[in-house]
Image: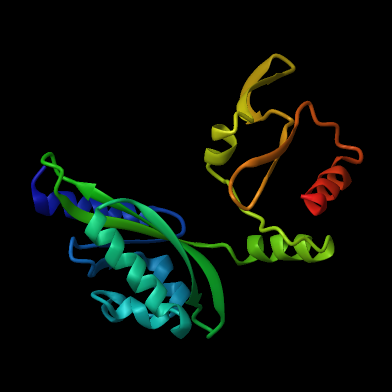
Amino acid sequence: MKRGGMEFALSHLVEALPGLVWTALPDGRAEFLNRRWCEYTGLSLEQAVGFGWQSALHPEDVDLVLEYWRSALESGQPGEVEARLRRYDGEYRRFLFSTAPLADKSGRVVKWCGTNTDIEERLKAQEAFRDKHQLSIPLISDEQHEMLDSYGVWGEKSMYGRTFQGILRTTVLIGADGRIIKIWRNVKVDGHADEVLAAADAA
């Protein structure tokens, strides 16, 4: 497929994807932002392309996002950063900005793809849980199960003859230095949360 045809196909794919999706040139200039992105921010495509998308960032987060973006462009590696994005009505919500490079056969980055995922409600739920239990430890999300897998608590399970991937009823308490403080295996639900919180307070 010729380059023009590939770009046309990619733009249609980006437009069809759910969520806020965009593509950028190798130098970091936004090339295309899908309709959902424009509708959410209230910016037109013409306003957002290039570096116009920066106007939708919270003023306090601009430097953070730009520093991350410069680092990603230099390294050519995928990554993520959290920042606040302005909705069309002026409200700022916290988003996860995820970026990944597209390379040609020689390994040269020819385009970037990115998504902006609203994580406001998830973070509020974490904060409410932390405040309710007066936790002094941070809470993290592991939606891709990478951390669970690295600690050996994500794997194959079976129920009623059906096999699937899931958490192996294990709780891992990890210290601020990343070391494991305690592991509970074959967890029973009743009273377990209180046991974990007590161990966290004692750590």
Is residue 33 shown to the viewer in this render?
Answer: no
Colour style of the rendered protein structure = rainbow
Q: Give the number of callouts.
A: 0
Q: x, y percentage for residue 47?
A: 29, 81
Describe residue 145's horizontal placement relative to residue 71 as left or right.
Answer: right
Describe residue 113's horizontal placement relative to residue 132 as left or right.
Answer: left
* Residue at x 28%, y 67% (from the top left corner): 70
* Residue at x 56%, y 40% (from the top left corner): 147
* Image: 48 above or below 136: below
Along the line of sight, which residue is nearer the eye, 68 or 11?
Answer: 68
Quadrant containing the N terminus is: top left
Q: Quadrant of residue 27?
A: bottom left
Q: Quadrant of residue 34?
A: bottom left
Residue at the extreme right of the image, as rendered:
191
Along the line of sight, which residue is nearer the eye, 25 or 34?
Answer: 25
Describe residue 63's horizontal placement relative to residue 103 as left or right.
Answer: right
Describe residue 177's horizontal placement relative to residue 168 as left or right.
Answer: left
* Residue at x 41%, y 73% (from the top left corner): 64
* Image: 88 above or below 160: below
* Image: 170 above or below 119: above
Along the line of sight, which residue is nearer the eye, 21 or 182?
Answer: 182
Q: x, y percentage for residue 139?
A: 66, 56
Is residue 187 shown to the viewer in this render?
Answer: yes
Q: x, y percentage for residue 23?
A: 28, 60
Along the line of sight, which residue is nearer the eye, 15 or 54?
Answer: 54
Q: x, y percentage for residue 197?
A: 82, 50
* Residue at x 35%, y 58% (from the top left corner): 114
Residue at the extreme top of the image, as rendered:
161
